[in-house]
Amino acid sequence: KLPDTSVIQLPVSKAETAPKENLVVMITNSDVLVQDVKVASVADILNSKEPMVAALAEELKYRASISPMAANAQGFVERDVTILSDKNISYNVLRKIMATCSDNDYSRISFGVIKGGSQS
């Protein structure tokens, strides 16, 4: 089940595939949450020169430790994560969130969107 998204405006997509139930990282205009637990503020991420978000990395490591997963055929662990981000969030913030997820074995990243949009 996805968390309450009334605090963010998701972008619209024409995609037909429904999301799987994954770990959810939500980016509101002010905070970054993992499964509804605040781990960082958007302002701190914007002001940081670091390429990743340390508090998010710590939470992802904890989440991975409580849900062990076998490695793929190449020997890499690839966990699923869904990012729900307000459509107005800076790409700089989104890039740091994605890099942090990927660096912590959550490399299969999906984005939550609102189904719709014009068919062209």
Image: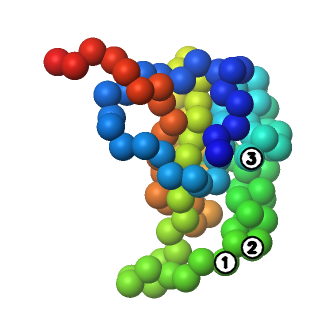
Q: Residue at x 59, y 30 (%)?
A: 85
Q: Which mark is residue 37?
A: none
Q: Are marks 1 and 2 in contact (CB under 8 Å)?
A: yes
Q: Amino acid at mark 2?
A: Ser
Q: Which mark is residue 68?
A: 1
Identify the residue under disc 2.
65
Q: Residue at x 55, y 65 (%)?
A: 79
Q: Quadrant of the N terminus?
A: top right
Does 98 appear above or below 59?
above
Total labels: the figure holds: 3
In the structure shown, which secondary structural element does the residue marked by tag 3 occupy?
A: loop
> Which residue is at the front of the view, 40 or 10?
10
Q: Quadrant of residue 60?
A: bottom right
The percent coordinates of residue 71 (x first, y second) are: 50, 82
Q: Quadrant of residue 5?
A: top right
In the structure shown, which secondary structural element does the residue marked by tag 2 occupy?
A: helix
Q: Amino acid at mark 1?
A: Pro
Going by the picture, which residue comes out furthest to the left?
Answer: 120
The percent coordinates of residue 58 (x first, y second) are: 78, 59
> Mark 1 to mark 3: distance in Å?
17 Å
Q: Specify whether residue 16 is in view.
A: yes
Does 105 appear above or below 86?
below
| 109 left or right of 7 in image | left
Q: Are marks 3 and 2 in contact (CB under 8 Å)?
A: no
Q: Residue at x 57, y 41 (%)?
A: 83
Around disc 1, counting alpha carbons within 10 Å, would you say few (fewer than 14), some (14 to 19), or many (20 or more)?
few
In the structure shown, which secondary structural element does the residue marked by tag 1 occupy?
A: loop
Around disc 3, counting alpha carbons within 10 Å, would you say few (fewer than 14), some (14 to 19), or many (20 or more)?
some
Around disc 2, counting alpha carbons within 10 Å, would you say few (fewer than 14), some (14 to 19), or many (20 or more)?
few
Q: Which mark is residue 35?
A: 3
Does 67 appear above or below 93?
below
